[in-house]
Amino acid sequence: MRHYISIIILALCLVACNRHSKHWKTLIQVESFIVQRPDSALAVLERIDTEELSSKEEKAKHALLLSMAFDKNVIDKTDFEVLQPAIDYYNDKGSASDKLRTCYYQGRIYENQGNLAQAMTCFCEGIEQGGGSEDLLTMANLYYSQGRIHALLFEWDKQCDVTLRAAELYKAVGRQNSYYKCLYQVLNACTQKEDYEQAERYIGLLKADLHLINPSIMADFYSAYTTHVARHSTPEKIRQVLGEYLSLVPEKELDYSSIALAYFELGEYDAALDAINKDTILDNYTAQTRHLVLIADIYRKKGEYKLAFETYYTYLVIRDKKLYDIYQSDTKFMEEKHSLEMQKAKETEAKDRLTIIVLVCIIVLMVLLYILNLIRKRLKDSRRKNALLESEKAHYEQMYNEVLAERNALDEMIADSSIKEETMEIIKKRLEVLNTIIVSHLSEKGTDVKRANDELERLIADRNDFIKSTRLTLEENYPHFFAYLKEKGVEDYEIDFCCLYAIGMKGKEIKTYTNLSRHYKDSSEVRQKLGLVESDTNLSNFLQNLLKNRPE
C-alpha cells in the first residue's frame, strides 16, 4: 500500500513540475530584460502562439508582458483585448508584482481612453495590492501617472505629493532622468499654486545637477524656470534666466509661451507677440489656455482691445468647456467611486455572510457529530449493560436452580432414616441455610435483588465447607469407609464426591453441587478402582452399602 502511495505522490509531483508549456521559460527570460530592451521583448512575445500556452497562468503572464512591451514601445492601447487574461487571472492570484503591474497597465489603458476616473481607481488598487512588491519601477510609474491626472484636474498639492513619491522611487532604482523629470513637474506645480519658496528649492536641486540632465528635460526645466522668474522675480533676474534659456536649449526644444511671458513681464510686447506666435504646438488644454491668455494680455497692453476681447472670449469658451468636463469627470469619478465602494461593501458583506454561514454549518455539524457520537456511545454502553444484566440474570437463575436442586436432594436424604444422626445434623443445618436463602430471594423487592443475589453467591461458595464438614463427620463415624477407599487407591478429591454419594446424593446432583466438569470420567475411574463392572450395582448404592456395612 505504501508503495502505491509513493508512486501516486511521485506522479503528482511530475505533473505539477510539467504543468507549463515550452514557452514558460521564454516568458520568464523576457520578463528579465523587458525593461532594458522593450523592442526585443515585444518581438519575442508577438511570435508566441497563444494557442500553445497550456494554462491560465501562462496566458496571464504573456498578456501582462505583452501589455508592458506595448506601453514601453509607446504603443498606446485603448482596449483590453491583450490585457484581459491578466486582469482575470491576477484578480485573486499571482504575486504582488503581478497584481501591481496589471492594475498599472489597466489604468494606463483607461488613461489612453480619457477615462481618468477609472484610471485613478486602477492606480489606487495597484498601490493597495502591490504594497509588498519589489517592482519599484512600476510603482514609480504608477505614482507619476497619478500626478499627471492630478495636474489635469488642477490638483497641484496632490500632484506634488505623488510625484515626489515617484521621484524617490526613480532615484532608488537609478532612473536619474525620470527623477529629474519628477522634480521639474513638482517645480511647475509649485509655480502654478504660487508656492515660490518651494519652487526655488527645486530649482536649486535641478541646477546643481544640470550637467547630468538630458537636453529634453533641461528644456522642460528652463521653461518652468523662466515661467517662475517671470511671475516672481526682478527684470534683471528675468533677463538672466531668459538669456540662459536661449543659449543652453536648442531652438527646436524652446517653449515660446514661457519666452513670451518673460518678454511680456519685461514690457517688450512686440517681442512677446512674436514669440507667442511661434508657439504652434498646442496639444493640451494647459498649453491652449496659457497661449490665449497671454495673447489677450499682450493685445490689451498694446491697446488693441478688440483683438484682446476676441482672444479672451475664445479662452473663456475653452475654459468653460474644460471646467464642465472636469466637473463631469469629478462627478462621474465620485459616482463611480461610490458605486465601486458600494459594490465592494456588498461583496464584503456577502463574503462575511458566507463565512458566518460556513462557520455556523461547521459548528452545527460538529454538535451533531458530538451528539451522534454521544448517542452511539450511550447505546453501546446500554447494550453492554443489558448484555451484562442478561448474563448476570442467567447466572443467578442457574445458581437459584442449583440451590433448589440441592435443597430437594437434602430433603430426600432427611427422609432416609438410614443416615446417622451426626450426618443428619450437618444436612439439616445446610438445609436450614438453603431454605432461608430461597425464601429471602423470593421475597426481595426489585431494588434489593442484588443483596439476595450476593447471598446466593456466598451460599454457593459455602458448598466446599459443607463438603468438608460432611467428610469430617463421616471420617469420625465410619473410619472403615475411608480406609477401604484409600486402600483401593481413590484420590482425596474423589473421596469428597464419594462422601456425597454415601449420604444419598445422586450423580446429577453431585455434578451440579461440586461443579466438577469431569464428574462422569472421575466416577468411571473410581468404579474401576473399586472393581465395579457395568453389570454391577451403581456407584451410589455401592458406596451407601459400604458406609453402612464393612466390606467382606
Image (cartoon, helix red, strand yellow):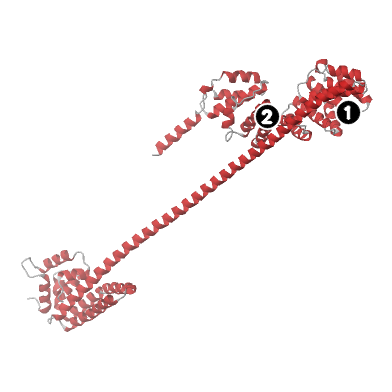
Name the residue located 50 percent from the left edge and 29 percent from the top edge: 19
Classify residue 511 by image quadrant.
bottom left
Inspect the image, locate mark 2, and give the three-letter code of the amino acid beneath it.
Asn
Q: In which quarter of the image is the N terminus?
A: top left
Query: Could you classify mark 2 by the number of other residues whose Cα lies within 10 Å: few (under 14), some (14-19), or many (20 or more)?
Result: some
Label placed on residue 115: 2
Classify residue 430 by image quadrant.
bottom left
Along the viewing direction, whichever of 533 and 39 lies nearer the viewer: 39
Helix, strand or loop status at disc 1: helix
Q: Is residue 33 visible?
A: no
Name the residue located 23 percent from the left edge and 76 percent from the top edge: 466
Image coordinates for residue 483, horizontal then vertical, percent: 15, 75
Helix, strand or loop status at disc 2: loop
Sequence order check, earlier mark of 1 and 2: 2
Classify residue 292 by image quadrant.
top right
Image coordinates for residue 260, horizontal then vertical, percent: 87, 21
Work out whether 258 lies above or below 361. above
Along the viewing direction, whichever of 549 and 333 lies nearer the viewer: 333
Along the viewing direction, whichever of 211 and 334 lies nearer the viewer: 334
Q: Which residue lies furthest to the bottom in this view?
A: 421
Kindly check if marks 1 and 2 are in contact, taking CB atoms under 8 A apart as contact: no
Judged left or right of residue 25, residue 169 is: right
Q: Is residue 138 visible?
A: yes
Instruction: Calculate the distance from the C-alpha at mark 1 to the C-alpha at mark 2.
Output: 33 Å
Nearer mark to the viewer, of 1 and 2? 2
Label placed on residue 176: none
Name the residue located 47 percent from the left edge and 54 percent from the top edge: 367
Label placed on residue 231: 1
Image coordinates for residue 143, horizontal then vertical, percent: 71, 32
Query: Could you classify mark 1 by the number of other residues whose Cα lies within 10 Å: few (under 14), some (14-19), or many (20 or more)?
Result: some
Judged left or right of residue 103, residue 545 is: left
Inspect the image, locate mark 1, and give the three-letter code of the amino acid beneath it.
Arg
